Amino acid sequence: MKIAIAGAGAMGSRLGLMLHQSGNEVILIDRWPAHIEAIRNNGLIANFNGKEIVEAIPIYSPEEVIKSNIQADLIIALTKANQLDGMFQAINSIITEQTHVLCLLNGLGHEDVLEKYVPKKNILFGITMWTAGLDGPGHVTLLGDGEIELENLEPEGEAFAKEVVAVFKDAKLNPTYSSNVRYSIWRKACVNGTLNGLCTILDCNIAGLGEQQPTNDMVRTIVAEFSAVAEKEGIELDQEEVNQHIQATYDPDNIGLHYPSMYQDLIKNHRLTEIDYINGAVWKKGQKYDIPTPYCAFLTQLIHSKEGLLAAK
């Protein structure tokens, strides 16, 4: 399959690498000049479960993709949430009636952006529980195991979605074809809405967060706010299961030693975060439905204040 990864950061590099290794025709699309130059000169260098591997994968800026008129059967959206619209506006001319897009971004509401550029029947949505770290231009750390769950947005997309599942299975990405991916998206949003913001503000990894006595109450309160808003959108979250799922991540043998993507963006790289598409989205939806979400509101404000202090860009 011809696959373009739109957003070749940590997670984009992981999927691109694994899909490339399984024999697909993969290209990476990114806007970071140093990252593009490093991969072109040295290949994508990965610490893959303790072993260093190097793979030569073509990488382009959006402008170069347009000039080259590159085509893809599947575009996997893995930009940051606040970069999604700009990326698809930039590469819009290579999207045809046959192009499908799989959105694996964290957060909520991305279908509203993609529907401007892609026929709704060609949109797939999913979540990934893989982890990845971007150590510098052209260098990533890929540890542990994970899985991907995906589903077509419209019934017409089912056949292609199942084809993608087969391709991902060959790449050992542990895919599942879902019958209710919207539930899973909200469930993962709860994970991101707790671990990402709290670890970033407290400057700790997931295990460190789990060791703190107030964590359980903070997490339960945030999950309750997500659940109340999700219910208004037709999603009934199992709060106890979600809380137990989050608690399991604290284990160092699970992903406890991992620093969430928001931490990597803001604390490590001084980049703007996706908070407006996670806790900020719940805060905004809560105002719409007249549901109080004080923890989500406060965490959103704290992260934006931290962005200001660190002059994040």
Image (cartoon, rainbow, N blue to C red):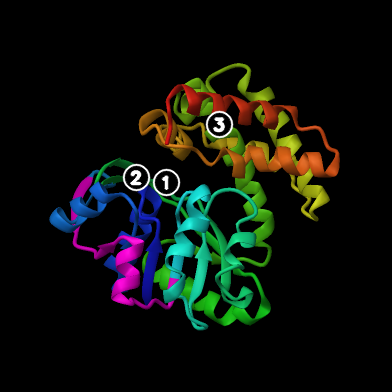
Quarter holding residue 137: top left
Q: Is residue 54 magenta?
A: yes
Q: Are marks 1 and 2 in contact (CB under 8 Å)?
A: yes
The x and y percentages for residue 119 are: 60, 76
The x and y percentages for residue 51 are: 21, 47
- At label 1, which amino acid type do we have? Thr
- Whole-Å distance between the Cαs marked 3 and 1? 17 Å
Mark 2 crowd level (few <14, some 14–19, many ≥20, 10 Å Cα): some
Q: Is residue 291 magenta?
A: no
Which residue appears at 43% of the width and 63% of the height?
90
The x and y percentages for residue 103 are: 53, 61
The x and y percentages for residue 105 are: 52, 53
Q: Which mark is residue 197?
A: 3
- Residue 138 visible from this viewpoint: no
Q: Which residues are magenta?
A: 51-74
- At label 2, which amino acid type do we have? Leu
